[in-house]
Image (cartoon, rainbow, N blue to C red):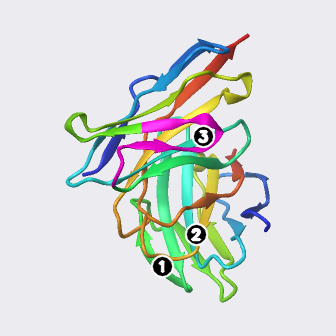
Amino acid sequence: AQSVTQPDIHITVSEGASLELRCNYSYGATPYLFWYVQSPGQGLQLLLKYFSGDTLVQGIKGFEAEFKRSQSSFNLRKPSVHWSDAAEYFCAVAPYNNNDMRFGAGTRLTVKP
Amino acid sequence: KAGVTQTPRYLIKTRGQQVTLSCSPISGHRSVSWYQQTPGQGLQFLFEYFSETQRNKGNFPGRFSGRQFSNSRSEMNVSTLELGDSALYLCASKTSSGGAADTQYFGPGTRLTVL
């Protein structure tokens, strides 16, 4: 069965510091992989997605993620965090042919001034 | 282009009642999916509708049902509400039901509280 693990429930970083959010997945084949962000009281906004090809994916708001098949990981990175990046981040996997998307438990990001 | 809209945004019900939530997808989107978000279980897929037909269903009891209208608007119904149904219910739309390659756009959610 497909599943997603986000090992870090809460991460605090200083503004301007780099960020890496971890995501590991379990799936029978290479799934479609996603990172979403959710601000308080809001729905989810897609940051980036990976289907195939180049394993380094660029997204919106300066985020990028790297797919590593050997480690079953899809970690999200940003070189310099802004205070407005404080939110909850969700990694998700989905099969190619339907919307049964499985989400990780989320990582809450706090940004210190 | 307007985003996904959900009504109402907040709802308070008591145990045993039923509730109907509404979702209007982005214009031109024919696939609508519903998700439940709770602190304990996280985000869980409920079901997907496309062209008025349920295409996929998550692991939820039959108290949770939905439908989709010819204009792609969707409703979700929960009968005999339980305390554990308190959650944020998110709706997402996309152009087709062809698969995950098509980007889903999420609405702001309906916050349901069951007392």
**Residue B92 spot, x, y in % from top left:** 60, 62
Count of marks placed on residues: 3
Q: Are marks 2 and 3 in contact (CB under 8 Å)?
A: no
- In the rendered image, which quarter is residue B77 located in? bottom right
Q: Which badge, 2 or 1, is on the more N-terminal residue?
A: 1
Q: Which residue is mark 3?
A: A37
Residue B39: x %, y % from top left: 55, 35
Disc nearest the viewer among 1 and 3 = 3
In the rendered image, which residue does mark 1 sit on?
B54
Q: Is residue B89 above or below residue A11?
A: below
Looking at the rendered image, the quarter that the C terminus of chain B falls into is top right
Asked if badges 1 and 3 are on one and the same chain, I answer no
User: Tag 2: residue type?
Assistant: Lys
The residue type indicated by label 3 comes to Val
Q: Which residues are magenta?
A: A53-65
Tell me the chain of label 2: B
Q: Which residue is mark 2?
A: B94
**Alpha-carbon distance for marks 1 and 3?**
27 Å
Position in image of residue A81 (x %, y %): 63, 22
Residue sticking out furthest to the front: A54
Q: Amino acid at mark 1?
A: Gln
